[in-house]
Image (cartoon, grey):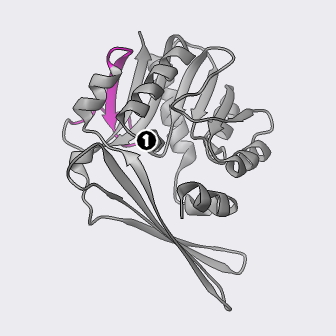
Amino acid sequence: MSANALYNDLSGYYDLMCVDIDYQAQSHCIRRLHQIFGNGGNTHLDLACGTGPHVRHFIDYGFQSCGLDINQPMLDIAAERCPEAEFTRQDMSSFAVAKPLDLITCFLYSIHYNGGLDKLQQCISHVHQALNPGGIFCFNVVAKDKINNALFVKHSTKHADDLFSFRSSWFYSGAGDMQSLKLSIEKSNASETQIWHDEHPMVAFCFADLIALLQPYFEVHMFEHDYNKIMPWDQQSGNAIVACVKI
């Protein structure tokens, strides 16, 4: 099953899959980074916005916020959640905006959905073009050389009469510029059990390579992957929050 097929089928349950994510803490952290490094403007675009929870928080913070994603069912839900915002179906590696923006975000490791280093380079270039002077680009990443293939995250939650169990893990073969996100989703009730398995191909890079791609366009700042604190990256951990100021 392709990534699009899975998410189109389960778009109504996507928020359940992400029920343990603290969207408010993530949004607040990036707002603080924007206050520290940004240009003082309030226009915002969320790449790979999904069902729009981050957009909702930025609107509530006073931003003129919008979002894009490649999955229309997700965007339909986002539009219901954030009727004030404009959502468009676009690929993050080749998107266009009507007017330059002050802040562009990409949460939940979604920057890795760029299909290879060439697509990632295109995404970075398009982000740079879409930002106002002094605008910033914030996203989170995982380093391919720090991935432990044995680790996974799992949680369960109830919805109506159904019990959902979600499991996700990173996998990197040890070579090349592609990794994968493996997903397993189980929906069960008194009469039946349904199971989905999927594997999403995603671009892989070490942090040195990422910084090299960003530096021609941005002043790059890297932080520990902790949305409750703003702490410089320790040069060792395999997850980071990146804040890029347009130059």
Along the viewing direction, whichever of 25 and 190 lies nearer the viewer: 190
Mark 1 residue element:
loop
| Residue 109 coordinates in the image, percent (x, y) | 44, 44
Residue bounds of the magenta highlight: 215-234
With respect to residue 205, does 246 lie above or below?
above
Q: Position of residue 31 (x, y in %)?
A: 53, 29
Using the image, determine if residue 136 lies above or below residue 201.
above
Up-down: is 166 above or below 209? below
Q: Quadrant of the N terminus?
A: bottom right
Residue at x 57%, y 40% (from the top left corner): 48
Q: Within 10 angstroms of label 1, few (less than 14), some, or many (20 or more) residues?
A: some
Q: Nearer the viewer, residue 238 or 118?
A: 118
Residue 65, image x, y percentages:
67, 29
The C terminus lies in quadrant: top left
Q: Main structural element of the magenta stretch: helix, strand or loop?
A: loop
Going 38% across and 39% down the picture, which residue do you hit? 116
202 w.r.t. 164: above or below: above
Q: Is residue 39 magenta?
A: no
Q: How many marks?
A: 1
Q: Amino acid at mark 1?
A: Gly
Residue annotated with mark 1: 115
Position of 60 with respect to 138 (left or right) is right
Query: Within the image, what quadrant is residue 56 found in?
Result: top right
**Residue 207 position by quadrant:** top left
Drawn side of residue 192 relative to residue 243, left or right? right
Q: Is residue 69 left or right of residue 30?
A: right
Residue 231 within the segment the image draws in magenta: yes
Query: For the view shown, which residue lies furthest in the bottom direction?
Result: 191
Residue at x 24% of width, y 38% of height: 206
In the image, 175 versus 12, the foreground residue is: 175
Q: Position of residue 178 (x, y in %)?
A: 33, 47
